[in-house]
Amino acid sequence: MAEFLMPSLGADMETGKVVQWLVKPGDRVKPGDVVAVVETHKGAIDVEIFLDGVIDQLAALDQEMPVGAVLAQVRPQGEGVPDAPAPERRGVGAPMVEPGGPRALPVSVMPVPPPPQVGPPVRVRVSPAARQRARALGLNPDALPGSGVGGMVSLRDVDRAAAQAKPAPDRAATAAAAPHPRAGGFDAAQMRQAIAAAMSRSKREIPHYYLSDSIDFTAARDWLEAWNRERAPEQRLLGAVLLLKATARALCEVPQLNGFYENGAFRAASGIHVGWAIALRGGGLVAPAIHDADRASLGELMAALSDLVQRARTGRLRSSELTDPTITVTSLGERGAQSVLGVIYPPQVAIVGFGRVVQLPWVVDGQVQVRPVVNVTLAADHRASDGHLGGRLLAAIERALQSPQDL
């Protein structure tokens, strides 16, 4: 019997509360299914499971539970139901009950016939924007044929499938459509305390070093204006997308800054999942991940970023988006300051910051001209890297922004 535990949705989370179960005992689950809504100081979060089997028991609703508490027991696919109830597990979690049960006590689960044997699910590469569009249309993105590089499912593939047929929505789509009991609600004061605790820990434990550079944004600005001029408003890009993609591309060259410092050593991440800092209305900050940002096109990143900001501000984030970031990027936008010195979000080892684009004197071919300039900064963990490596990252970001057509 496997255990599904309360996930850690960031270094600033200590406890959470299950406010809605989207499964019941006897339901078959597979990796990536959204099974619960957990309320934290960041709001109501859709929590995914990464086990394959049949739900056996569930924890009680509305009980404050620490990270690592047992939320559910999952019987491996094909394993029969035990003849007697499993011994009571108390550990760090709340007692296991059926959803809606009157008492927080262990209960027996009625025998259910094991689901038919099936092979392991085939994991299809799906771009973030295509996955989000598919869910919004009630399609299973993993079941669609892909025409992109390496068979990746793209937005075009999703739109083509939607025009041909509309399959029954999967559990993820159902979860996205179901109203949260407290969607969008969070305690701003509690969030601020949690952020302060995490950042205090970061400054106390992580030996930060800081680097800064100024980048001529002319090439990026001109390319962006030309791109947007030829497209409808819904297809246009923001400058933030270029900054995001340039950072992701640079991390391909300097992977030593894309990962985590854990157990006294650096662990490189298997993918580039950029945590994009989003300011919440009413105060607070979250930095959910945009997965595989280096592989997505600019259009896909624009769709993913817009979707992420909207869901972050309405309390619709998913647990994987809060646990997966491998580096954080913060952009102050056109109303922000000229530069920002970030604080590393543990266990990550770096944070990249972009200020607003400003007009400054710039020397070009020996002549002083007025150019749009953006300041980029890096705060990095001296336990995992040094200034030489950090300088290489900033230089790679600058090179990427000088050739926006290649992003």
Image: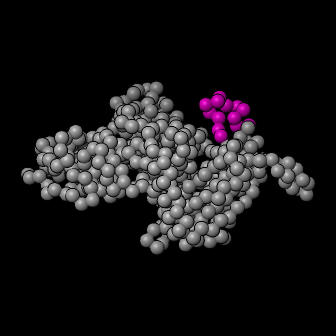
Q: Is residue 367 above or below residue 37?
A: below
Percent position of residue 367, x then y: 91, 54
Lateral position of residue 79 relative to residue 365, left or right: left
Residue under the point 21% across and 52% down:
95
Task: Give the camera-side residue of 69 and 319.
Answer: 69
Asked whether 47 or 74 is in front, the reply is 47
In the displayed structure image, the side of residue 372 where residue 112 appears, left or right: left
Q: Position of residue 14 (x, y in %)?
A: 39, 56
Q: Residue at x 24, y 60 (%)?
A: 91
Tell me, yes or no, whether the highlighted magenta stretch contains residue 394. no
Residue occupying the far right of the picture:
367
Point 12% across, 43% down: residue: 110
> How many labels, in total?
0
Q: Where are the magenta residues, as a range?
A: 226-238
Q: In this view, which residue lies farthest toward the front? A: 189
- In the picture as drawn, the residue positioned furthest to the left comes out as 83
Instruction: Identify the residue at horizontal 84%, vertical 54% (top origin).
Output: 362
Asked if the stretch drawn in magenta spans residue 235, the answer is yes
Q: Quarter of the image holding residue 203? A: bottom right
Q: Is residue 105 visible?
A: yes
Relative placement, left or right, of 30 versus 192 is left
Residue 136 is situated, as x and y percent measured from the top left of the image, at 44, 33
Q: Where's residue 53, x and y in %? A: 25, 49
Residue 291 in sight: no
Question: Where is the N terminus found, in terms of image quarters?
Answer: bottom left
Q: How is the image coloured?
A: one colour
